[in-house]
Image (cartoon, rainbow, N blue to C red):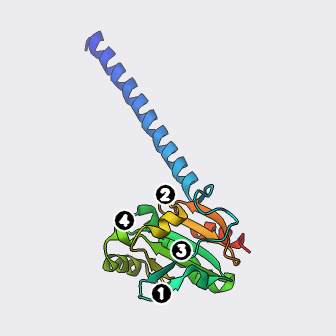
Amino acid sequence: MNKKNIGLILVLILVAIMLGTYITEQIEKSKQIKAESIGREVELVGAEKGKLAPDFTLQTLEGDTVSLSDYKGKKIVLNFWASWCPPCKAEMPHMQDYYKKYADKENVVILAANLTYEDGSKDKVQQFIDSFNITFPILMMGNKEVVNTYKVISLPSTFMIDTDGRIQHQIVGPLDQASLKEYVHSLK
Protein backbone atom coordinates (compact mmCIF):
# COMPACT_ATOMS: atom_id res chain seq x y z
CA MET A 1 0.00 0.00 0.00
CA ASN A 2 1.37 3.37 -0.90
CA LYS A 3 1.27 6.63 1.06
CA LYS A 4 -1.56 7.98 -1.10
CA ASN A 5 -3.89 5.06 -0.23
CA ILE A 6 -2.98 5.27 3.46
CA GLY A 7 -3.75 9.02 3.44
CA LEU A 8 -7.10 8.37 1.71
CA ILE A 9 -8.01 5.68 4.26
CA LEU A 10 -7.14 8.05 7.13
CA VAL A 11 -9.29 10.81 5.63
CA LEU A 12 -12.22 8.38 5.21
CA ILE A 13 -11.85 7.23 8.83
CA LEU A 14 -11.85 10.84 10.06
CA VAL A 15 -14.93 11.66 7.95
CA ALA A 16 -16.71 8.57 9.32
CA ILE A 17 -15.87 9.59 12.90
CA MET A 18 -17.07 13.17 12.31
CA LEU A 19 -20.27 11.94 10.66
CA GLY A 20 -20.93 9.49 13.51
CA THR A 21 -20.39 12.24 16.08
CA TYR A 22 -22.69 14.61 14.21
CA ILE A 23 -25.47 12.02 13.92
CA THR A 24 -25.19 11.13 17.61
CA GLU A 25 -25.43 14.82 18.57
CA GLN A 26 -28.50 15.30 16.36
CA ILE A 27 -30.22 12.27 17.91
CA GLU A 28 -29.53 13.61 21.40
CA LYS A 29 -30.87 17.07 20.45
CA SER A 30 -33.99 15.46 19.00
CA LYS A 31 -34.56 13.47 22.20
CA GLN A 32 -34.12 16.63 24.28
CA ILE A 33 -36.56 18.62 22.13
CA LYS A 34 -39.07 15.77 22.28
CA ALA A 35 -38.76 15.52 26.07
CA GLU A 36 -39.12 19.28 26.48
CA SER A 37 -42.23 19.43 24.28
CA ILE A 38 -44.28 16.94 26.30
CA GLY A 39 -46.95 18.71 28.28
CA ARG A 40 -45.55 22.15 27.49
CA GLU A 41 -47.73 24.97 28.74
CA VAL A 42 -47.93 27.88 26.33
CA GLU A 43 -49.07 31.43 26.62
CA LEU A 44 -52.76 31.58 25.80
CA VAL A 45 -53.31 32.99 22.36
CA GLY A 46 -57.08 32.90 21.90
CA ALA A 47 -59.02 32.38 25.07
CA GLU A 48 -57.30 34.18 27.92
CA LYS A 49 -56.09 32.68 31.18
CA GLY A 50 -58.50 33.47 33.98
CA LYS A 51 -61.33 34.35 31.59
CA LEU A 52 -64.48 32.30 31.23
CA ALA A 53 -64.02 29.54 28.68
CA PRO A 54 -66.11 30.28 25.60
CA ASP A 55 -69.21 28.09 25.66
CA PHE A 56 -70.10 25.87 22.73
CA THR A 57 -72.55 23.10 21.91
CA LEU A 58 -71.51 19.97 20.02
CA GLN A 59 -72.76 16.45 19.45
CA THR A 60 -71.05 13.52 21.07
CA LEU A 61 -69.99 10.47 19.11
CA GLU A 62 -73.17 8.81 20.43
CA GLY A 63 -75.34 11.63 19.04
CA ASP A 64 -76.16 13.44 22.30
CA THR A 65 -75.92 17.23 22.36
CA VAL A 66 -73.74 18.75 25.08
CA SER A 67 -72.50 22.21 25.93
CA LEU A 68 -69.33 23.11 27.77
CA SER A 69 -71.48 24.93 30.33
CA ASP A 70 -73.18 21.60 31.18
CA TYR A 71 -70.01 20.73 33.09
CA LYS A 72 -69.74 23.88 35.22
CA GLY A 73 -68.76 22.86 38.74
CA LYS A 74 -66.40 20.19 37.38
CA LYS A 75 -62.76 20.50 36.44
CA ILE A 76 -62.62 20.20 32.65
CA VAL A 77 -59.83 18.90 30.46
CA LEU A 78 -60.80 20.15 26.99
CA ASN A 79 -58.62 18.33 24.48
CA PHE A 80 -58.54 19.09 20.74
CA TRP A 81 -57.34 16.14 18.65
CA ALA A 82 -57.56 14.24 15.35
CA SER A 83 -57.10 10.57 14.52
CA TRP A 84 -54.30 11.31 12.01
CA CYS A 85 -52.22 13.15 14.65
CA PRO A 86 -49.36 10.94 16.05
CA PRO A 87 -48.97 12.92 19.33
CA CYS A 88 -52.75 12.62 19.82
CA LYS A 89 -52.43 8.86 19.47
CA ALA A 90 -49.59 8.89 21.99
CA GLU A 91 -51.56 10.76 24.66
CA MET A 92 -54.92 8.95 24.37
CA PRO A 93 -53.95 5.91 26.49
CA HIS A 94 -52.67 8.28 29.21
CA MET A 95 -55.90 10.27 29.13
CA GLN A 96 -58.00 7.11 29.36
CA ASP A 97 -55.92 5.74 32.26
CA TYR A 98 -56.16 9.07 34.08
CA TYR A 99 -59.91 9.32 33.47
CA LYS A 100 -60.52 5.78 34.67
CA LYS A 101 -58.50 6.29 37.88
CA TYR A 102 -59.29 9.89 38.83
CA ALA A 103 -62.43 11.26 37.14
CA ASP A 104 -64.68 10.69 40.15
CA LYS A 105 -62.04 11.37 42.83
CA GLU A 106 -60.90 14.64 41.25
CA ASN A 107 -64.34 15.84 40.03
CA VAL A 108 -62.96 16.05 36.48
CA VAL A 109 -64.29 15.36 33.00
CA ILE A 110 -62.24 14.97 29.85
CA LEU A 111 -63.96 16.35 26.77
CA ALA A 112 -62.09 15.23 23.66
CA ALA A 113 -63.09 17.51 20.78
CA ASN A 114 -62.34 15.74 17.50
CA LEU A 115 -61.61 17.73 14.34
CA THR A 116 -64.23 15.67 12.50
CA TYR A 117 -64.20 18.07 9.56
CA GLU A 118 -60.61 16.89 8.94
CA ASP A 119 -60.96 13.25 10.04
CA GLY A 120 -63.62 12.72 7.39
CA SER A 121 -66.14 10.41 8.98
CA LYS A 122 -67.76 9.37 12.22
CA ASP A 123 -66.75 5.76 11.46
CA LYS A 124 -63.07 6.72 11.36
CA VAL A 125 -63.39 8.48 14.72
CA GLN A 126 -65.28 5.51 16.20
CA GLN A 127 -62.60 3.12 15.01
CA PHE A 128 -59.92 5.27 16.66
CA ILE A 129 -61.86 5.48 19.93
CA ASP A 130 -62.53 1.72 19.94
CA SER A 131 -58.83 0.98 19.39
CA PHE A 132 -57.99 2.81 22.65
CA ASN A 133 -61.13 1.77 24.61
CA ILE A 134 -61.91 5.43 25.32
CA THR A 135 -64.78 6.01 27.77
CA PHE A 136 -64.74 9.80 28.19
CA PRO A 137 -67.01 12.01 26.02
CA ILE A 138 -65.93 12.49 22.40
CA LEU A 139 -67.22 15.68 20.83
CA MET A 140 -67.60 15.93 17.06
CA MET A 141 -66.70 19.19 15.31
CA GLY A 142 -68.18 19.40 11.83
CA ASN A 143 -66.53 22.78 11.21
CA LYS A 144 -63.75 25.04 12.51
CA GLU A 145 -65.93 27.29 14.66
CA VAL A 146 -64.80 26.00 18.09
CA VAL A 147 -61.18 25.59 16.94
CA ASN A 148 -61.21 29.22 15.78
CA THR A 149 -62.85 30.41 19.00
CA TYR A 150 -60.13 28.75 21.07
CA LYS A 151 -57.40 29.74 18.56
CA VAL A 152 -56.07 26.18 18.36
CA ILE A 153 -52.98 26.19 16.15
CA SER A 154 -51.42 22.82 16.96
CA LEU A 155 -52.62 19.34 17.90
CA PRO A 156 -53.07 18.13 20.46
CA SER A 157 -54.04 21.26 22.37
CA THR A 158 -55.52 20.94 25.82
CA PHE A 159 -57.26 23.59 27.91
CA MET A 160 -57.55 23.16 31.68
CA ILE A 161 -60.76 24.78 32.92
CA ASP A 162 -61.54 25.21 36.62
CA THR A 163 -64.83 24.60 38.43
CA ASP A 164 -65.90 28.21 37.82
CA GLY A 165 -65.51 27.69 34.06
CA ARG A 166 -62.32 29.74 33.79
CA ILE A 167 -59.35 28.74 31.63
CA GLN A 168 -56.24 28.22 33.75
CA HIS A 169 -53.81 26.48 31.36
CA GLN A 170 -53.31 25.72 27.68
CA ILE A 171 -50.95 22.87 26.91
CA VAL A 172 -49.65 22.11 23.43
CA GLY A 173 -48.34 18.63 22.77
CA PRO A 174 -49.11 15.26 24.27
CA LEU A 175 -49.76 14.85 27.98
CA ASP A 176 -48.90 11.83 30.05
CA GLN A 177 -50.86 10.68 33.09
CA ALA A 178 -48.54 12.40 35.59
CA SER A 179 -48.80 15.73 33.77
CA LEU A 180 -52.58 15.44 33.57
CA LYS A 181 -52.78 14.78 37.28
CA GLU A 182 -50.53 17.73 38.07
CA TYR A 183 -52.46 20.19 35.88
CA VAL A 184 -55.87 19.03 37.13
CA HIS A 185 -54.68 19.13 40.73
CA SER A 186 -53.73 22.81 40.24
CA LEU A 187 -57.35 23.67 39.34
CA LYS A 188 -59.78 24.78 42.00
Q: Give residue 65's mark.
A: 1
Which residue is label 4 attached to?
A: 84
| Nearest to N terminus: mark 3 or mark 4 | 4
Report, in whole angstroms, how far the alpha carbon at label 3 lies from the one at label 2. 21 Å
Circle count: 4
Q: What percent of the width, then of the height, locates residue 105?
A: 68, 84
- Seen at 66% across and 75% down, the residue is 165
Residue type marked 4:
Trp
| Nearest to N terminus: mark 3 or mark 1 | 1
Report, in whole angstroms, how far the alpha carbon at label 1 lies from the one at label 2. 25 Å
Task: Report the front residue among 56 and 80.
Answer: 56
Q: What percent of the width, then of the height, locates residue 139?
A: 46, 79
Report, in whole angstroms, how far the alpha carbon at label 3 lies from the one at label 4. 17 Å
Residue type marked 2:
Ile
| Nearest to N terminus: mark 1 or mark 2 | 1
Q: Determine which quarter of the picture holds residue 45.
A: bottom right
Front: mark 4 or 1: 1
* Label 3 close to label 2 by CB (< 8 Å): no
Q: In the picture, which quadrant includes the N terminus?
A: top left
Report, in whole angstroms, how far the alpha carbon at label 2 lies from the one at label 4. 16 Å
- Up-down: is 149 above or below 75? above
Q: What percent of the width, then of the height, locates residue 117?
A: 36, 70
